[in-house]
Amino acid sequence: MLKPQLNELGKLAKDKHNENKKYFDKLKKKAPKNLDYVMQDLHDVEFKKTDCLECANCCKTTGPLFTSADIERISKHFRQKPQQFIDQYLRIDEDKDYVLKSVPCTFLESDNKCFIYDVRPKACREFPHTDRKKFQQISDLTLKNVEICPAAYNIVEKMKEKIVL
């Protein structure tokens, strides 16, 4: 399968949205027992050939949620008090979560590297969440991520080939 070009990804994901939604609805009702193993395998295969530094679309177009542990860890890295970090970089969104004040991510450098990579938020470390346990429980998130991440798009397409519902 060819990797979708970033400029085509939004259209491809939109074209597949209804198909993917129906697929995930079925998956929620009757997930195969080996789903987590299949997803881990698909994730590993895709990320052996995917270099996130070539893309960084997730960092350019969306921002992660920051947990209290993330805020503690990152503020310590900056030698700031947590409240200083919050005041400088974060806001509270409509779901009452801490998120970045703006995108692209404040910590994204011009070479697509992350300035705080070693202490980055949990949401960033786990993105695009395609190797998550109980994968069927995050289908809404996955539907959004295939619009942002070419690797997530490819993983979902391979998943539909491998797990026929």
Image (cartoon, rainbow, N blue to C red):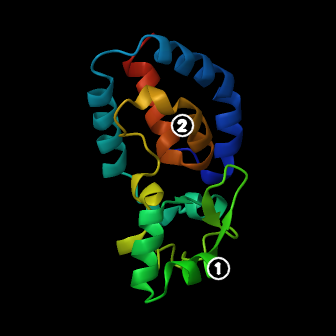
Label 2 neighbour load within 10 Å: few <14, some 14-19, many 20+? many
Q: Single out the mark in the foreground, 2 or 1.
A: 1
Relative placement, left or right, of 79 versus 12 is left
154 shown above or below 96: above
Q: Quadrant of the C terminus?
A: top left
Three-letter code for the amino acid on which mark 1 is drawn: Asp
* x and y percentages locating residue 11 in the rendered image: 71, 39
79 shown above or below 151: below
Q: Secondary structure at mark 1?
A: helix
Label 1 neighbour load within 10 Å: few <14, some 14-19, many 20+? few
- Residue at the spot 44% in from the left edge and 66% down from the top edge: 70
**Residue 110 visible to an observer of this rendering:** no
Residue denoted by label 2 = 142
**Picture quadrant where residue 36 is located:** top left
Using the image as rendered, state which of residue 42 and residue 61 is in the foreground: 61
143 shown above or below 117: above
Q: Which residue is most to the bottom? A: 79
138 shown above or below 20: below
- Residue at the spot 70% in from the left edge and 57% down from the top edge: 93
* x and y percentages locating residue 83 in the rendered image: 56, 79
Instruction: Looking at the image, tell me whether mark 2 or mark 1 is earlier in sequence order.
Output: 1
Residue denoted by label 1 = 87
**Picture quadrant where residue 52 is located:** bottom left
**Residue 147 visible to an observer of this rendering:** yes
> What is the distance, in whole Å, between disc 2 and disc 1 at their CAs?
30 Å
